[in-house]
């Protein structure tokens, strides 16, 4: 688990890891130079077997590489510091291992998004929620603009070593690029529907949020180029080239019009693939702004308005979450043994106390 300034969520995430019914596990937290109480909170779980190490801030990818260098497990479960695992997530995936032909099979599972009330999260199957070959998985991901959340995977040590380390030069989509390499080294994906993950929507605070940052735009374009190269290394056919152009067309809106240099590179790559890219399409919600004020203003609104809407929705969810807690004298019964108030660690009698502010 990489952790950076995760004091608000890390206690519940660790509880979900400790609550795994699969007992043969080790939990390693790499505190990536946090400036809040992340390390202090994580260390309160050390008596329960959690190992906490701290490094100078170097990014999530570097923290994951550090964690892997310290672990001894036969299978690797990556987990961000604000997400949750269902108690039987790992056990359900381990159950299918005896029927697999080799340790290069990559295990995945379903995930549901939530903001605060994870017990209300809905699991809606997506295009990747099935057994797939590496080629078909990447075709689906790039062609249908979909993904699998990082914590859904369970990866053998053999496969992890074959894929190589996380790329710590990518500021965004490092997980997407990493699991492309895992897929290339794998013999296929086995989907386990009963293995469930709860994925917290962090909005603009998310590592995956690109926005208008030039550094993140550069990193995202680099990741896209790698995605295309990985897919074409498996098969360089008409359907693959067509899928790659669809991928470019879907993401050109990220860079247009403020990064003409990247847009030009995208068009050149599409031409090499035998097709042309078109100017991105804005939905009706922003096309009126383009007509009145131009592309840059419309693009700015496209970035700002969803963030404002997301902030309102998150505030509403937070209020409902606290209301539910207040209305329940014994607190909400949840499947992980997690404190829904996110306020402390249960004592031996199951009572919750505030986390200490002392070091």
Image (spheres, helix red, strand yellow):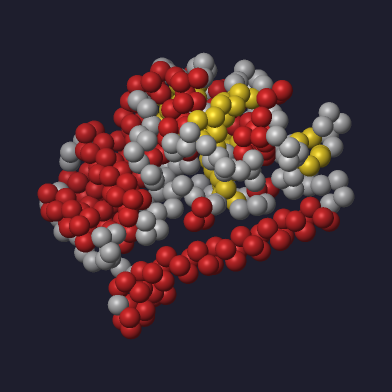
> In the drawing, does residue 91 fall left or right of residue 232?
right
- Identity of the residue drawn at 84% across and 52% down: 328
> In the drawing, does residue 335 fall left or right of residue 245?
right
Answer above or below: position of 165 versus 305: above
Answer above or below: position of 160 versus 113: above
Q: Depth check: give the residue in front, 311 or 24.
A: 311
Q: Depth check: give the residue in front, 284 or 168.
A: 168
> In the drawing, does residue 52 fall left or right of residue 67?
right
Quarter-wise, where is residue 101 in the image? top left
Kindly tell me whether residue 292 is visible in this rendering: yes
- Identity of the residue drawn at 56% across and 26% down: 53
Quarter-wise, where is residue 185 in the image? top left
Residue 293 % position (x, y): 33, 81
Kindly tell me whether residue 190 is visible in this rendering: no
- Identity of the residue drawn at 44% across and 38% down: 59
Answer above or below: position of 252 versus 105: below
Residue 225 % position (x, y): 25, 44
Residue 283 % position (x, y): 37, 71
């Amino acid at each position: 688990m990489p952790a950076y300034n995760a004091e608000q969520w890390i206690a519940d995430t660790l509880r979900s890891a400790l609550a795994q019914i699969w007992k043969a596990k080790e939990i390693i937290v790499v505190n990536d130079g946090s400036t809040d109480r992340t390390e202090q909170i994580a260390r309160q779980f050390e008596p329960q077997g959690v190992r906490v190490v701290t490094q100078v801030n170097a990014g999530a990818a570097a923290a994951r590489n550090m964690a892997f260098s310290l672990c001894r497990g036969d299978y690797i479960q990556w987990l961000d510091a604000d997400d949750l695992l269902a108690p039987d997530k790992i056990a359900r995936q381990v159950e299918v291992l005896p029927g697999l032909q080799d340790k290069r099979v990559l295990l995945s599972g379903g995930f549901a998004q939530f903001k605060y009330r994870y017990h209300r999260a809905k699991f809606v199957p997506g295009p990747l929620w099935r057994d797939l070959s590496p080629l078909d998985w990447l075709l689906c991901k790039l062609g249908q603009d979909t993904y699998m959340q990082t914590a859904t995977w369970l990866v053998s040590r053999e496969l992890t070593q074959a894929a190589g380390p996380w790329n710590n030069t990518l500021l965004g989509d490092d997980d997407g690029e990493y699991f492309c390499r895992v897929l290339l080294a794998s013999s296929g994906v086995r989907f386990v529907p009963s293995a469930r993950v709860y994925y917290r929507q962090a909005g603009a605070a998310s590592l995956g949020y690109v926005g208008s940052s030039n550094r993140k735009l550069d990193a995202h374009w680099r990741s896209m180029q790698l995605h295309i190269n990985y897919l074409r290394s498996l098969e360089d056919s008409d359907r693959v080239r067509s899928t790659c152009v669809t991928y470019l067309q879907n993401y050109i809106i990220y860079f247009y019009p403020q990064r003409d240099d990247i847009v030009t590179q995208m068009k050149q790559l599409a031409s090499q693939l035998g097709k042309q890219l078109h100017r991105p399409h804005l939905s009706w919600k922003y096309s009126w702004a383009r007509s009145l004020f131009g592309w840059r203003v419309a693009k700015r609104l496209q970035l700002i308005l969803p963030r404002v809407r997301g902030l309102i929705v998150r505030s509403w969810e937070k209020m409902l979450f606290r209301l539910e807690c207040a209305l329940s004298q014994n607190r909400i019964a949840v499947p992980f043994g997690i404190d829904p108030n996110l306020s402390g660690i249960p004592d031996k009698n199951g009572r919750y106390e505030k986390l200490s502010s002392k070091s």
